[in-house]
Amino acid sequence: MTENPTDAASHESRGERGKGVFGRLTQFLREVILELRKVVTPTRKELLNFTGVVLAFVVIVMALITGLDFVIGIVTGFVFGGGSWTSGN
């Protein structure tokens, strides 16, 4: 299987052609460090806001799943349980 010429050209332009495993690993670590320098830590107000949004979303999804579970339980009780929607009968 031959390499696509455009792939080879893109590797050569980035200086990746001919690098060994350790050269590629070093390049990867350099790029990781460069990306981590771009990370911005949120302020306390932003952090509290993001936390509130996530918690509200989790509560909404929990309520939705609980409601669906309740409805599906009632429906399966009618279909398979003889028509009673309470578990005590």
Image (spheres, rainbow, N blue to C red):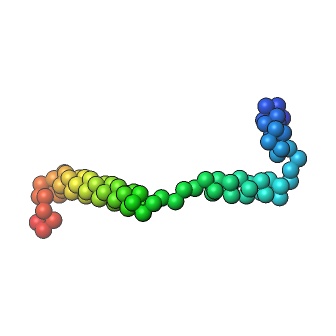
Tell me where residue 71 appears, x and y as whole percent: 20, 53
Which residue occupies 86% across, 50% down? 19
Q: Is 67 in front, or is 24? A: 24
Quadrant in the rendering for residue 87: bottom left
Q: Quadrant of the C terminus?
A: bottom left
Position of residue 24 relative to residue 13, above or below, is below
Quadrant in the rendering for residue 62: bottom left
Which residue occupies 12% across, 54% down? 83
Tell me where residue 13 appears, x and y as whole percent: 82, 38
Task: Count all numbered tags in the image, as a single digit.
Answer: 0
Q: Is 57 in front, or is 70? A: 57
64 sits left or right of 20 in the view: left
Tell me where residue 4 appears, x and y as whole percent: 80, 32
19 sits left or right of 32 in the view: right
Q: Is 3 in front, or is 55? A: 55
Is residue 65 visible to the viewer in this orientation of the structure?
Answer: no
| Residue furthest right in the image | 18
Q: Quadrant of the N terminus?
A: top right
7 sits left or right of 67 in the view: right
Q: Is 57 in front, or is 79? A: 57
Which residue occupies 82% across, 45% down? 16
| Residue furthest bottom in the image | 88
39 sits left or right of 14 in the view: left
Which residue occupies 88% across, 47% down? 18
Is residue 75 visible to the viewer in this orientation of the structure?
Answer: yes
| Residue furthest top in the image | 5
